[in-house]
Image (cartoon, grey):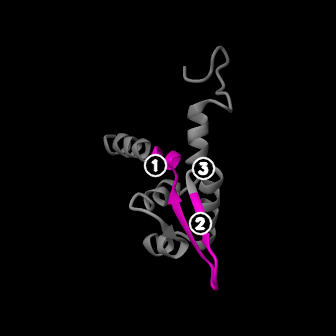
Amino acid sequence: MLCTGTDPRPEPDCPVEVTLGVLRGRWTPLVIDQFRAGPRTFGEVAAALPALSDKVLADRLAQLTAAGVLSRHRTPGWPARVRYDLTDRGAALVPVLHAMWQWGADT
């Protein structure tokens, strides 16, 4: 079995568990998908996903930034503008999400 050795429970540092931890939470794959075309602001993502609350979007952006999937760039000035973009690590998740989509579509 993946990441279990002789113990039937997965290890917390198992790469599969790490990946699933990054993708945890409803909306996370859809938020990641918004950045495939390039950098986006909070407002642009919120407009593209109108059913997603601002609170959940803020949580997902912080979660993905902390995981190294997104980078956060603040432009000085008033009002300050913040843009998010996929990191190389985040871009590597795109084919993983596509494979998950394909698997789900085939069932």
- Sequence-wise first label, 1 or 2: 2
Closest to the observer, 3 or 42: 42
Structural crowding at the residue carrying mark 1, measured as other residues with C-alpha within 10 Å and reported as few (<14), some (14–19) or many (≥20): some
Circle on res. 18: none
Report the residue marked by disc 3: 68
- Sequence-wise first label, 2 or 3: 3
Furthest residue to the top?
Answer: 6
Residue at x 60%, y 50% (from the top left corner): 68
Label 1, label 2: how far apart the Cα atoms are: 17 Å
- On the image, which quarter does residue 35 sit in? bottom left
The answer to whether residue 72 is above or below residue 51 is: above
SS at circle 2:
strand
Please provide percent x and percent y for residue 18.
61, 38
What segment carries the magenta color? 71-93
Give the number of the mark in front: 1 or 2: 2
- Sequence-wise first label, 3 or 1: 3
Label 3, label 1: how far apart the Cα atoms are: 11 Å
Closest to the observer, 43 or 75: 75
Three-letter amino acid code of the residue under disc 1:
Ala
Three-letter amino acid code of the residue under disc 3:
Gly
Circle on res. 73: 2
